[in-house]
Amino acid sequence: MTILVTGGAGYIGSHTTILLIEAGYDVIIFDNFSNASKESIKRVEKIVGQNITLIEGDIRNKTDLEKVFENYSIDAVIHFAGLKAVGESVEKPLTYYDNNIYGTIVLCETMAKYNCKSIVFSSSATVYGDPHTTPIKEDFPLSATNPYGRSKLFIEEMLRDLHLSDNTWNIVLLRYFNPVGAHSSATIGEAPQGIPNNLMPFIAQTAVGKRACLSVFGDDYDTHDGTGVRDYIHVMDLADGHVKALNIIKKLSEVMTINLGTGVGYSVLDMVKAFEKASKKEVPYCIAPRRAGDIAKCFADPTYAKEILGWEAQKGLEQMCEDSWRWQSNNPNGYKEED
Ligand code: NAD
Ligand code: UDP
């Protein structure tokens, strides 16, 4: 089976590509490199020991996409391509709606034209907004507090409407919790451009000495130590969820919406302590005001993923921190030679 992986050069896409190839799929990566480096693909090729077909293009460009579907017989698409920075989405909402929503429309139109109607979509726990309770189940109410989150919500709705209009579509919506960690080779990992927005890369860059100190956004939340609680999931576990989704995708009669999380919540200070232990480095931090739009607690009920996909996270916090540290300390500037 040939899988088109949009955004396959990015953080989650590159890790997923490895498992897809190891599972025997043929992979074609389609990426515009707006937030990725070609070096990530070179390193994936080394890990899997084979060349990977890479097509540089933009999902909003019908001609780029049609060329791919003309030249290859694609059985299914894993759709990672998208912009993901919450703060930037508030500043540039139209850029986010154009890239994420319009891009997905063009992708689905092209898929339909070439009769490829199986898609796994990267959604996010952000679609739960501020949940009334935890752990979060898939049938919880949905809402969004920023354009990034709204783009994910709209795309989910759009894909549900698409299925209503034509039930030969096979659609899996995977709602990721907080992906962290890196491949065990330490040759690929998360490489944010500029100052990281997310906690784990910020901690890792602080431990390696690139940042002076971590600002902990708020210590007065209703959590065990007052700092925000999230469900951190190892990126290789997340990648495995995609392979398992592909295993069932052709048998689906309805749109599947599935949480991919561990079911365990850790606070910011839990993460700092675990990272210090794994890296044997100090992570200096100071308490800062809450970040606008943040919620106290967010962690998954992953029961449905186990039931429907036979998937369950395997890697714990220690491994997440060790793998993040190995990647960060071996590649202090990510895929760049120097900063
Ligand atoms: P990433 O930025 O590392 O990867 C996204 C990739 O898509 C990049 O390689 C980028 O160059 C490419 N891309 C963006 N717009 C494109 C376009 N118009 N045409 C072609 N390629 C394009 O991000 P990631 O962390 O790997 O996330 C992958 C997906 O998962 C995204 O859709 C993201 O919203 C979603 N997600 C991520 C997280 C997270 O915390 N990392 C959490 C929930 C959901
Ligand atoms: N966080 C923090 N300092 C940072 C980045 C994040 O204290 O520099 C906190 C944030 O307030 C939240 C948790 O870490 O409680 C996870 O934040 P992240 O942005 O990684 O994920 P999200 O908020 O999108 O779940």
Image (tube, grey):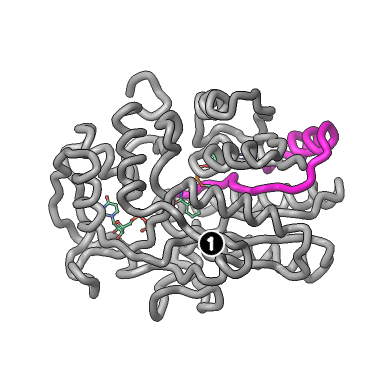
Is 171 placed left or right of 203 in the picture?
A: right
213 up-or-down from 141: above or below? above
Of 37 and 40, the residue lying toward us? 40
Dot 1, how many residues are within 10 Å of its Cα: few (below 14), some (14-19), or many (20+)? many
* Residue depicted at 30% across the width and 65% down the height: 229
Mark 1 Cβ inside 8 Å of ligand 1: yes
Quarter of the image where one finds residue 332: top left
Q: Which residues are magenta?
A: 59-85
The N terminus - image quarter:
top right
* Residue depicted at 64% across the width and 36% down the height: 21
In this figure, which residue is indicated by the disc labeled 1? 175
Q: Give the image location of residue 54, x and y in percent.
A: 66, 28
Is 155 placed left or right of 86 in the picture?
A: right
Which element is circle 1 on?
strand
Asked whether residue 95 appears in the rendered view, the answer is no
Q: Give the image location of residue 172, x and y in percent.
A: 66, 61
Q: Give the image location of residue 271, x and y in percent.
A: 26, 54
* Residue depicted at 74% across the width and 34% down the height: 64
Is residue 49 magenta-colored? no
The C terminus - image quarter:
top left
Of 185 and 61, the residue lying toward us? 185
224 up-or-down from 204: above or below? below
